[in-house]
């Protein structure tokens, strides 16, 4: 497919929103320690920028799950491709996602991680396609609500490409 990329959210807007989210998290978890569960690969860029701006003690672990192939269409349930290294029992856990689309990934992930008895379990997502949810799941923190368009950049890929774009762009077919 021939396509070009239109900018949807600038690097500056993303950075200032992440500062706001980090402040909110500092307030909400004041006096506590926070364990970030980062969902590979797409969330890594967001998670690093967010973690740098949180001032309460933070630990990080990484997990890879998949509900999508290399295309643009949802494929149902998730598969765990890389497990967490550490136990989350009794921890204040915040799942860090790049994007909430149908919600299938986060719904299944929340069920999976809840069973491991964290002290608390919340979700932060950089982007939320609210109009696309097919499951009963809401993120506790949302960077930006976006329309139902396929987006790339800031960690998000199209067939593994464009993750390194410093802004969020929309894939437009030529
Ligand atoms: P969900 O399970 O449908 O909510 O999809 C979540 C996952 O699908 C994300 O973690 C992304 O990897 C992928 N995804 C959904 N929408 C997009 C998009 O617009 N661009 C790139 N990846 C996407
Ligand atoms: Mg992906």
Image (tube, rainbow, N blue to C red):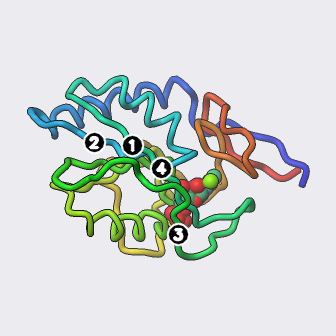
Per the rendering, the mark at residue 39 is 4
Question: Residue at 38% across / 31% down in the picture?
Answer: 50
Secondary structure under tag 1 reads: strand
Frontmost of labels 1 and 4 is 1
Image height of 71 relative to 108, above or below: above
Q: Residue at x 47, y 54 (%)?
A: 128
Q: Is mark 3 within 8 Å of ligand 1?
A: yes
Q: Position of residue 115 (x, y in %)?
A: 26, 69
Residue at (51, 38) in percent of width and height: 44
Kindly identify which residue carries mark 2: 35
73 relative to 35 in the view: left or right: right
Task: State the SS at label 4.
Answer: strand
Q: Which mark is residue 78?
A: 3
Per the model, the C-alpha gap separating discs 4 and 2 is: 13 Å
Q: Categorize mark 3 by other alpha carbons within 10 Å: few (<14), some (14-19), many (20+).
A: some
Give above or below for 134 relative to 5. Answer: below
Question: Which one is earlier in the sequence, the residue at label 1 or at label 4?
Answer: 4
Q: Are marks 4 and 2 in contact (CB under 8 Å)?
A: no
- On the picture, is 97 further left or further right than 79? left
Q: CA distance from mark 1 to mark 4?
A: 9 Å
Residue 72, how many percent across, how many down?
A: 71, 62
**What residue appears at the point 46 percent right and 61 percent down from the top-left corner?**
130
Q: Specify the label residue 71 is tagged with.
A: none
């Amino acid at each position: 497919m021939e396509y070009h990329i239109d900018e949807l959210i600038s690097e500056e807007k993303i950075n200032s929103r992440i500062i706001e989210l980090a402040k909110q998290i500092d307030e909400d978890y004041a006096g506590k320690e926070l364990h970030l569960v980062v969902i590979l690969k797409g969330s890594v860029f967001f998670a690093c920028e967010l973690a740098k701006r949180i001032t309460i003690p933070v630990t990080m672990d990484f997990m890879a799950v998949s509900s999508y192939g290399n295309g643009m269409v949802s494929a149902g349930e998730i598969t765990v491709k890389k497990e967490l290294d550490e136990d989350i029992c009794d921890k204040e856990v915040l799942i860090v996602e790049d994007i909430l689309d149908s919600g299938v990934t986060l719904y299944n992930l929340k069920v999976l991680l809840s069973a491991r008895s964290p002290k608390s379990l919340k979700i932060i997502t950089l982007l939320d396609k609210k109009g696309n949810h097919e499951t009963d799941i809401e993120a506790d923190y949302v960077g930006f609500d976006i329309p139902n368009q396929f987006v790339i950049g800031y960690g998000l890929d199209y067939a593994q490409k464009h993750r390194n774009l410093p802004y969020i762009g929309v894939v437009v077919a030529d």
